[in-house]
Image (cartoon, rainbow, N blue to C red):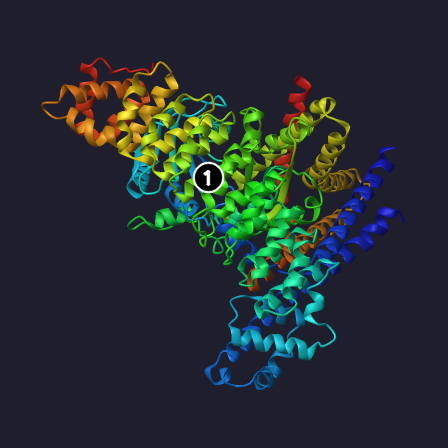
Amino acid sequence: MSALDILLLVGPVAAVMAWGALALHVIRVQRERVEAHELMDVVVKTLQLDEMRHLSIETRIQRIKPLVDRASRDMVMLVAANLETEREAFEALYEYLLLRWPERPVVREASAHRTRREKWRRTASLRILARLQHADVMDLLEHAAASPDPDVASVAFALLGRSHDPRAADVLIAALLTRRHPASRVAVHLEQSPQPIAEKLRPLLQHPDPVVRLWSATLVASDTHTEEGFEWDLIPLLDDEDPRVRKAAIGSLGKMHGSIAGEAALGLLRDPVPYVRAHAARALAEMGRTDMAGDIAALLGDADWWVRQAAKESLHAMGAEVWRVLMPCLEHPDRFVRNGAAEVFQNLGIVDSLIVMEAASDGPAERKIEMLRQITSAGGVRFADSLVERAGPVVGARIRQLLGKIGLEHVEAY
Amino acid sequence: MLHSFIPASIFFALIVLAGGAIVTVVQALKAGARREEASIVQEPVAASRFTIPVSILLPVDSNQDALPQTVRMLLGLAYPEFEVIVVAGRLEGDVLDRLSTEWGLAAKEFFYRHSIETEPVNRIYRAGVDSRLTVVDKAGAGRADALNCGVDLARYRYVCTIPDDVEVETDGLLRVMSPALWDPAQVLAVSSHIERAPCGRYRSPTADASAGQAGAEAPRPRLSARLTAPYQYLGSIRSLMDSRLLWQGLRGGLGPTEHVIVWRRDALVQLGGFSKTAADPSLDMMVRLQSAGPERMPGHVVRSAEVFGHAPPAPLGEIIRRTKERQRAAAETIMETSRARSSVAPNARRQEGKIVAYFLTSELIAPLLQGWAVAAMVLGALIGWFSWYQVVLVLVFLSFGNAIVSSAALFLRAAAPGAPEGRDLNRLLVTSPLEFILYRPALAYARVTALGSAIARLVSD
């Protein structure tokens, strides 16, 4: 009998048996999961009954014991760690965990992990202890935030970001300083922290690490507790040697809508780094500095596309007031400036609401026709076609006729 | 000689396949099916202005009926900042009307940088109702050209390429972007899965679009789609298992067959955009990103085990066409990597070799060994070396071996939301042994013809 013969005798039987065993295991695991969830649903609903709420925790636990004794520890932890579980149910389940498994304190499980399963238990324990506002939770979260494991650190950051404990913001800021994990991930949670963080960040605006400076500059603007005075701390950063810091500083100044920031931003419109110029333009738009629209319009011809895009969007954001600044741009020798100005005119609705309606009337004013000519010439064929299409079949036909009359039926962006 | 080679090769193939199945099951049982609850971490990210914005590109060629519903779903994604760019090769009149009615589309010129050359754009429409939506009507020149046009127009640092007729999960983008959000400087692309779920588990945008029309009934999938639906579903679930067990330990990867991928825009532009001649432009781009070398393209590709969305079962003809395409793409991958090897640093070459080896194992070697075992056995039976009873035994062995792997994949699938449960699960488990006989021959045919034409092309070149 050859090896293949033996394999063909044993193999199929083994394969059928292995498949059967595995299939049964999968069904069993799935059934147990469903049953466990149903069981815990009943436990939580029982704990939330009105007649249960006024009872002591010990009595509540006694009442649910026959049910919850059938659940695994992980299942009880899962439900206790779920933020949607109501407070009364959560407290009872936590006490139950301590009573039934005294040899495995939640605090210990929240402090370290080795395996994947232990990691899950660690993060669940951290959530439970954070909700409980346990005395040791800040130490445990600090330890978790310093963990090299990104999953554990993420959960720690998220819990610290929700915490009302003043130390939580300190731990997050420490994580920002050590940079064991990406600063942007820490910043997400600092930004949403209910703690006043701006004052704590103020000294970090001079930190030697540019990443710390940039995030400190960014975050001070998102703190709703921020009082006046931060503008003066941010102004020096507009001359920072690191362009990311300059960008962050001007972005924050834009959000603060302060009076001194506009003049400072003006200088950054000529920064050697494109994204700083782009952010300066956006910041000026955010401050509503229409008096500086001319300086932004100059960026329509910038060498960098993102700066041109930022200039167009900033001018658009400033509103129809900028049209006088844009008019000369339509005749600018640089094609990009002409195109950009035409696009802003289009997006502001000036072309549609003012000129087109006028031009399509029986007696169009010469000045409006001239404006239409300038804008459509600067925009090009597709710009003019889009204009006609937007106007609809009736008015569109008249505009097409008018464009023909002024020699623009096959307009090219020159 | 041949008389001893054929039984030995069949024995070898069966042993390798059995070994692979055992390793897979052990790995799956070790990984476990515990459901992780990630919302505590995701919620702040979903609301943060520091979350990197994404441009979602939806190239549409045919199948434009479902477009309004797909756009609605995409704009409903839970993500702080994103835009949706629909790039259509000739928009059909009523589709444009429907989009215009719902989103207030207006033709508006937009001057953008043509970083990648594409076929001309006829018109750009911006939505008045939701400024995040842009629709581009351009000359039809295939998916790659549409994607390149979208990359040109994209405003954000990451672009997400998505097929049409996919029902997306609301938090899909957030989950897929997770590795990029954690380390944007190092992540060049992240792939995620589209699950082909049977009818009843999936609400197709096409069905919704038709149901929305007065008196219209949701179209029923074709018979071949309905009959093969469980096996398409099992295929998706196995692919998900590959991502979790095979690819996650590797710093690099190639996307699954049915995918949604987020790319770093600058990397796409640097490599000249998607290839218009590649069988699978996304797979080709993933290979090029990783074979460019760390000096030119610092960073890595991530194959994540996230499900971005669901799609309805496809008709058999479509499945065969896609399998052929994927096989051709696999052949191109091997050729591309062997061509690029000389210009790559030794470290990157080792890494690239590992990625290609993983890819070949999951996409080529296992089906080839299965095909060889059956073909050689049948050949031997025809010659008279084996009895037909032994052929049946090989089929039983392979069918149940395949079913074991599918069961392991179903076990792992439970770790993510939307896993099959109850009767659905039982049905999938019970029918899984039939897949090898009822469904795989069609895929084998597609693979053989695609490989044949790839080899013929190679010889003629």
The residue at the point 61 percent across, 37 percent down is: B185
Camera sees residue A365: yes
Q: Position of residue B404 (x, y in %)?
A: 70, 54
Camera sees residue B162: no
Q: Is residue B280 above or below residue B414?
A: above
Within 10 angstroms of label 1, few (less than 14), some, or many (20 or more) residues?
many
Question: Would you say A228 lies left or right of A83 here?
Answer: left
Q: Quadrant of residue B249?
A: top right
Question: Would you say A18 lies left or right of A55 here?
Answer: right
Question: Would you say B119 lies left or right of B377 here?
Answer: left
Judging from the image, what secondary structure is the residue with disc 1 in?
Answer: helix
Screen quadrant of the C terminus of chain B? top right
Q: Position of residue A67 (x, y in %)?
A: 60, 80
The residue at the point 49 percent across, 78 percent down is: A48
Instruction: Indicate the amino acid at tag 1.
Output: Gly
Screen quadrant of the N terminus of chain B? top right
Quick one: which residue is furthest to the right in this view?
A: A1
Q: Who is closer to the viewer here, B129 or B403?
A: B129
Q: Who is closer to the viewer here, B177 or B19?
A: B177
The residue at the point 20 percent across, 14 percent down is: A406
Q: Position of residue B72 (x, y in %)?
A: 39, 46
| Residue marked by disc 1 | A251
Q: Is residue B305 above or below residue A49?
A: above
The residue at the point 22 percent across, 21 percent down is: A371
Q: Quadrant of residue A320?
A: top left
Q: How many marks?
A: 1
Q: Who is closer to the viewer here, B429 or B188?
A: B188
Chain under disc 1: A
Q: Position of residue A197 (x, y in %)?
A: 52, 53
